[in-house]
Amino acid sequence: MTGDLPQVREPGRAARRGSGRTPRPPATIEDATFARLLVRNPPRAGEHAGGYWLRVAHDNGLMRPRWLLPAAGGSTMSLARVCPACLSKPDPIWLEPWGQRELPACATHRAWLAETCTGCKRPMRWGAVRLLACFCGHDLRSLPSTPMTAHAQRALFDDRVPLAVLLWLGALVLHGLDGKPLKKATRQRMQDVIALAHAGAEAVQDWPAGLHRALDACRVPRSGEGPALRLLNDALPGLTRHIRKIADPAWRALIDKALGEYVQASHREGEPLIGRNAPGARPTTVAGYARVAGVRPLRLSGAFDRLPGSEAARRQTAGGRARRLVTQDTATQARRLLADQITPKEAARTLGLTVRRIQALVKAGQLVSPGGPPHTLSRAAVAAHRQRLAAVLSCAPRPADATTLAHALRLWVPMDRTAGLLDAMAAGRIALHGTARTMRAANVWVSEKAVRAWVSTPQEAARSWLTIPECAERLGIKQEVAYHLVRKALIRTERVNSGRREAQVVPLGALEVFQGEFETLARAAQRAGVDHRAGLEWARANGVELVSGPGVDGGRQYWVRRDSSAAIVPEESPPQVVDEGWTSTAP
């Protein structure tokens, strides 16, 4: 049959030099070349230009279709992609969408196009394929096709998401920002395209949570000593620059919006993100919040610094400026803090005390808002303190030795015992006489005898704590041993204002707990009738738990747990710590 066909001479070397161009429509082919073909079928609707010449060569029995391509122009080295299922149909043609880079997939069969011949293991090129076979002879209809995932089908064909967007999202998911998502997304090998598109489709179908998970995965970890408040470009370097290079404006805006939601969600986490380049971010300055609140910016800035967690919401820039995370809730808390602030003079006028007395109450932890900044006067706390004293006012006749509270404070009550006296009054140990309408120190009456008796009582008796040296004296041990027990957290301590400084003290309850749980090894051995010099050997032989000592934690004296020693020898009544004239049954 091939002998009946007109003999078309292979173009010479000069003609083959122009073979680096893509096929063009048949109207531009030299009429002489086209006229010498026996079969001259016209192109079909939707047929690829290069595929048309493959079909013309097939119909005319030409073994090398590339002979026709130079006249059409184009590169014979360009990749050729096919859908094996479409070629398996009767009277097949190469479709125009197969040559498009925008979507290398078959919309009919919802599968990715094949680009590699499984016979010769090489990528198919226009100069090395026929209509139905590769030049190696392998049938193109038998090539395996990679099916799309359900999410990829829905994204590409139903939701019309551009493939370039899926590749960008897939590169971000699989490679992160360090992998240069735009560069990864421009790869054209089908195995890369398929992997990126499937990963991007997963993110699209769970929008925007899918993008947020990808951002969490590629977020640069914060160094342990760095500030919790971070700039967006520090946590996700180069992300906004990559987003601006996305060609599709609708998806670029959608990704910007999702990134803005991600930044806003970080404000409720432990590592908030800020930055003027954050999409949709229009950060309000402190001056702007100050104008709304009607206060000076410097005063509002100080209120922000006094809020709990202000260090985590503040960042020092390289230029020396302070950047803060200020949300609407933060601004509301700052305004409430400013409204609640009261000066010592105002508090003194409200309670009828001197400014020095007010300062003594503040040092004692009174007149400040619970959980608020330390040593800051609270209007609400001052009002509550006044109400607490007004609640115990007595309408009974005044005692014979009645004197005003202001007079008693001035003559008999030391400055550092102001808080204790007011607590005693609120507890009812010192009666107050007057009316709530005149709740001021100059209009409230007290018994001179009761006040002077309270002042003459040793201050320690009114305390609910002991210093560490006093604790050592109570336990009958050296101070060095007591300090070691405190460092090892065997004796619980707390910090209180004592006089003009803050001190570490032992609550009486904590000392009582310690005495109930622990005892010296010497005392435990003595109760067992063992010489104190053999006490360590006795304890180890009988399973007595050692909690402190030279061989345990480097302490100077051995201590054991009472529960472990009580199982061996009868337990004595544990010593009781009382607060009555410094008496105790402790050794």
Image (tube, rainbow, N blue to C red):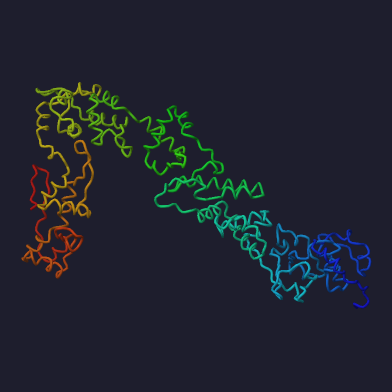
Residue 453 occupies which quadrant of the picture?
top left
286 in relation to 5, above or below: above
Q: Residue at x 11, y 24 (%)?
A: 399
**In the image, is 183 to the left or to the right of 113?**
left
Q: Residue at x 9, y 43 (%)?
A: 580
**Image spot of residue 305 (x, y percent):** 38, 37
Residue 117 occupies which quadrant of the picture?
bottom right
**Image spot of residue 109 (x, y percent):** 71, 65
188 in relation to 265, above or below: below
- The answer to which of 578 and 54 lies nearer the viewer is 54
**In the image, is 331 to the left or to the right of 563?**
right
**Image spot of residue 428 (x, y percent):** 17, 33
- The answer to which of 477 and 20 lies nearer the viewer is 20
**In the image, is 518 to the left or to the right of 44?**
left
- The answer to which of 286 and 560 lies nearer the viewer is 286
Residue 137 occupies which quadrant of the picture?
bottom right
